[in-house]
Image (spheres, rainbow, N blue to C red):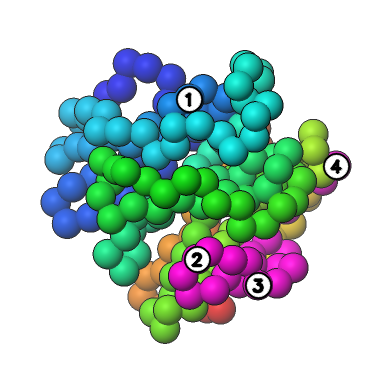
Amino acid sequence: VLYADYSDPDAIRVGDDFYLTASSFAHFPGLPVLHSRDLVNWRIIGHAIQRHPSELFNAPQHGMGVWAPAIRFHNGEFYIYLGDPDRGVFMTRSKNPAGPWEPLTLIRKVTGWIDTCPFWDDDGTAYLVHAWANSRAGIKSILAINKMNPEGTAILDDGIVVFVGHANHPTIEGPKLYKRNGYYYIFAPAGGVKPGWQTVLRSKS
C-alpha cells in the first residue's frame, strides 16, 4: 500500500476521506499527513510540523522526537497528539488537514509518556490515553488515562492506570481509544514487535 517506512501509522475517516499520520522521530518537516479515498492509494498532502520547539533538533537526534502520533477530528478541527518520551506530550491542530497546522504546544512536561491518543466523549469531556517507555520511565506494560480540558489543550489530572499487562500482555503500548454502542474500547498491540499480538480492552466506564 505504501512503499515507504511509515512507522506507527494512525488513520481516521472524515466523511468520504481518510487521513493518516505516522512517526517522524527527528526528521523535519515532520508528522506527514496523507490522504486517501480508498485506503489503498495515498498521497502526502502536507506535514503538521515544520520544526521541533527544541533547538536540540537542529542536528540529527537518532531515535528521539516524534513517537507514535494519533490523528483525530473533533468539532470541525483536526488534532494530532504525540508523546516525545524525553520532553512530554505535544499537540497541534488545524481546520485543514493539508495545513497550515499550529506550532507544537506542550500540554504536559513529563518523561516517558508515549503513544498518546485523545478521545472526546459524547458530552464533550476529553481524555488522553497513553503508554510508557521503559527506556525513559523505568516502567512499561501499563496504560493510563488522563482527563483534559474540552479544548484538548491541557491535561487536568495525574491520571489513573486502567490496565496492567505484566502478566499476560507484556509491552502493551500504542493505545487507541474509541466508543461504540455504550462501550469504551482500547485497541493496543502487546508482546513486542515480532512476536506480538493485538489486544482489545472493553469497559462500560
* 10 Å crowding of disc 4: few (<14), some (14-19), many (20+): few
Which comes sooner in the sequence, label 4 or label 2?
Answer: 4
Give SS at disc 1.
loop
Judged by its main secondary structure, the magenta piece is: loop
In front of the other: 142 or 132: 132
Task: Give the CA separation, mark 2 to mark 3.
Answer: 10 Å
Residue 100, quarter of the rendered image:
top left
Image quadrant for the N terminus?
top left
Q: Residue at x 31, y 60 (%)?
A: 77
Task: Give how far apart the Cα atoms at labels 3 and 1 are.
Answer: 30 Å
User: Is there a contact, CB below 8 Å, between mark 3 and mark 1?
Assistant: no
Q: Residues within 10 Å of mark 2 (few under 14, many from 20)?
A: many
- Please tell me the numbered disc located at residue 28: 1
Q: Earlier in the sequence, mark 1 or mark 2?
A: 1
Task: Decide which of tag 1 and tag 4 comes sooner along the chain.
Answer: 1
Q: From what the image shows, is residue 78 above or below residue 137? A: below
Q: Nearer the viewer, mark 3 or mark 1?
A: 1
In contact (CB < 8 Å): disc 2 and disc 3: no
**Count of residue discs:** 4
- Whether residues under marks 1 and 4 lie with C-beta atoms below 8 angstroms apart, the answer is no
Q: Which mark is residue 156?
A: 3
Q: Which residues are magenta?
A: 138-161
Nearer to the camera, 94 or 11: 94
Asked whether the residues under the numbered discs 4 and 3 touch, taking CB atoms below 8 Å apart as contact, a structural biologist would say: no
**Residue type of the residue flagged with mark 2:** Gly
Question: Where residue 204 sits in the image (x, y, percent)?
Answer: 52, 78
Query: What element does badge 2 sit on?
Result: loop
Numbered disc 3: secondary structure: loop
Q: How far apart are the two marked residues, 1 and 2, measured between alpha carbons?
A: 24 Å
Q: Which marked residue is nearer to the observer: mark 4 or mark 3?
A: 3
Q: Mark 2 highlights which residue? A: 152
Q: Is residue 154 left or right of residue 34?
A: right
